[in-house]
Image (cartoon, rainbow, N blue to C red):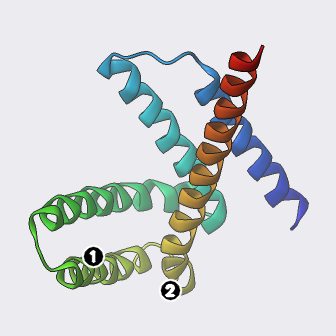
Amino acid sequence: MCMKTLFATVVLVMGMIQVNAQPPRPDREARMAEIKKIQAMEMAFITKELNLSPNEAQKFWPIFNQYRNDLKSVAVEGKKMNDNLEKQQRMLDLRKKYREDFSKVVNQDRANKVFEAEGEFKSLVRREFQKRQAEKKQFESRKKGS
């Protein structure tokens, strides 16, 4: 792993730690603020992974945000469907459509990498969440044992 990637990953994880280190706030606004922070971290991560120039980023992010909204719509529709394969096919079709849209802003290789970077970020977040859950369990068990 190159030094830049390592540094960016450490910064990303530290940012996630800071977001999760704050005490939980039950109100909707606080939850939305946390989601916005994670989305900002995702933006930084994907921008770095795709090596987007400022000009490319300005064109890329509105397309990506529309992709994300369309993906959410398909996921919501998919919950109503009994056919999981049909849901997966709709998501695949959506990704293919947006890959074409992304390739109008960045080259084909980087357009393909969008989905890879998105998956890597989700994996980072998932691992960090699991780590925090395990630490929380450990802390609670020690607390009960004392």
x%, y% of residue 64? Answer: 37, 61
What amino acid is found at the position of numbered circle 2 in the picture? Gln
Which tag, 1 or 2, sits closer to the chain's start? 1
Q: Residue at x 56, y 85 (%)?
A: 109
Quadrant containing the N terminus in the rendered view: bottom right
* Numbered disc 1: secondary structure: helix
**Relative to 135, does residue 6 appear above or below in the rendering?**
below
Q: Give residue 116's mark.
A: none
Outermost residue toward the front in this view: 145
**Relative to 20, does residue 112 appear above or below in the rendering?**
below
Label 2 belongs to which residue?
Answer: 108
Q: Is residue 112 left or right of residue 94?
A: right
x%, y% of residue 54? Answer: 56, 54
Query: Residue 146 falls in which quadrant of the image?
Result: top right
Q: Residue at x 42, y 26 (%)?
A: 33
Q: CA gap, disc 1 to disc 2?
A: 20 Å
Q: Nearer the viewer, residue 62 or 40?
A: 40
Label 1 belongs to which residue?
Answer: 91
Q: Residue at x 57, y 53 (%)?
A: 126
Q: Nearer the viewer, residue 32 or 24?
A: 24
